[in-house]
Image (cartoon, grey):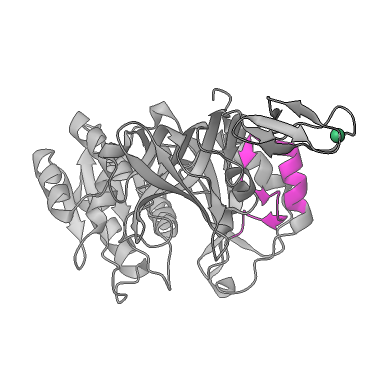
Amino acid sequence: MIKKLWIGLDDTDSKRYGCTTYVGALLLQSLKAAGYNVIGYPRLVRLNPNCPYKTRGNAAIAIAVETDKIEPIEDIVIRIIENNSDLQAEGTDPGAVLVVGEPSQSLREYYWHVVRDLSTIEEAEKIAKENNVSLLRWKAGRGIIGAIAAIGADLTLGKTYELIAYRKKEYWGTIRLVDPESVWEMDKATYPLTFDNIDKETGEIRITPHTPCPVLLGIRGVTPNIVEEAYKILKILEPVEFYVIFETNQATDAHLQLAKIKDVKDSVSVIIDGVVKSKPSFTIGGHVFFRLEDGTGEITCAAYEPTKKFRHIIVELEPGDRVTVYGAVKKKPQGLTLNLEKIHIKSLTELYLVKAPKCSVCGRRMEKIGKTGYMCRKCKVSLSEPEIVKIERKISPGVYEVPASARRHLSKPLALTSNY
Ligand SMILES: [Zn+2]
């Protein structure tokens, strides 16, 4: 009987070499070449961006094929991983897993745990045992965590697509030959159905990475058709090895969960409703910090230097403003600190300036006399009430986000959102 078999893999890359998506793409090509029917799109699943063991993007891959035999697939997976992982590098601990049939509820829950929190190899082993997951591992095998999570990922709640084009090996490490004009043209024709093509603030092309990896470019979009259509608009001036369209959890906010400040801990990503407690200010290094409270506690919120113009919104907040903050929490010398990805400014507090009133005769500011009175000595005019001036706030309620260059893979861009 033909069965569905899920293959997951993770942690095949290192800081100096390789790319988990490339290993996934090679596995896909090998499976197809061996005559297997691949079901649906291969998955590129981003996991907790705060994971201290992560390489660059903390990505895992899952592919589903039709088969009734596991062993020949295992042989292909082993060959692909051993030939294309940086096994010599410290911290590269590949893992691959195989699951027959659809993932259980327990695997689905494990995905949410891994995308939002930290897991351990022991926890992954326990889940694998309880759910008949076959494990393949190299060295410490930390990759089994992401590999299981990628299979458990439930993308019915939200998904996007990424077309990744790969380079011929002789071009790895050289400048990527993609005509920037054509990227602007592609963006104009397809944005916001494709997104993060260009950082509009700096003009930086975002589809091409800067690392010496095999990726030529990646186009993110809301449907498989639009990323392919966008790809065809590009003028690419070097040969392309091949391209793959992945189904992903990128740009879905899957990592974020509503939380109260008292429950927040290191390395989780959260959404907190609160009130600004302290006036934000720029620090050395160009970072902006403020304190937020929600009735259960207080936390520091940060807009770091790379968030550029976003900081100029944050620095205009005042104590008493009601906001919802979105971001990853890290333990820092100043305590738990939320690295802002987005902010919803819900209401601005009204600010007033109390001034001495003007003299009705000569127009000059009066002098304060005693506790409540004001007087113009020259004209001998007195008043008991000060002048109260409403301070014009420089920001408006609304949702603000960091620029594309500072956005995390999992963060949902506002361009894809209409319901804030
Ligand atoms: Zn006067």
Work out whether residue 175 or residue 379 is closer to the camera in this orientation and state it.
379
Whether the magenta-drawn stretch holds residue 192 is answered as yes
Depth order, front residue of 180/392: 392
Image position of 194 (left or right of 44): right
The residue sitting at the right extreme is: 362
Residue 203's spot in the image, x, y percent?
Answer: 73, 55
Which percent across, then down, holds residue 17? 43, 71
Q: Which quarter of the rendered picture does the C terminus lie within?
A: top right
372 or 62: nearer the eye? Answer: 372
Residue at (23% x, 59% y) in the render: 142
Name the quadrant where ligand 1 sits.
Answer: top right
Question: x and y percent of residue 408 in the render?
Answer: 49, 49
Q: Can you name the residue that lies furthest to the top here?
A: 419
Q: Can residue 335 be seen in this view?
A: yes
The picture quadrant where one finds residue 263 is top left
Quadrant (top left, top right, bottom left, bottom right) of the N terminus: top left
Query: Which of the 4 image quadrants contains residue 168?
Result: bottom right
- Residue at 32% from the left image edge and 75% from the top image edge: 89
Left or right: 370, with 38 as reference point: right
User: Eyeballing the image, is 67 above or below 234?
Assistant: above
Q: In this view, does 275 lie to the left or right of 108?
A: right
State the extent of the magenta-drawn residues as a range: 182-208
Task: Look at the picture and state if 90 lies above or below 142.
Answer: below
Identify the residue at image location x=19%, y=57%: 136
Q: Which of 325 and 74 is in front in this view?
A: 325
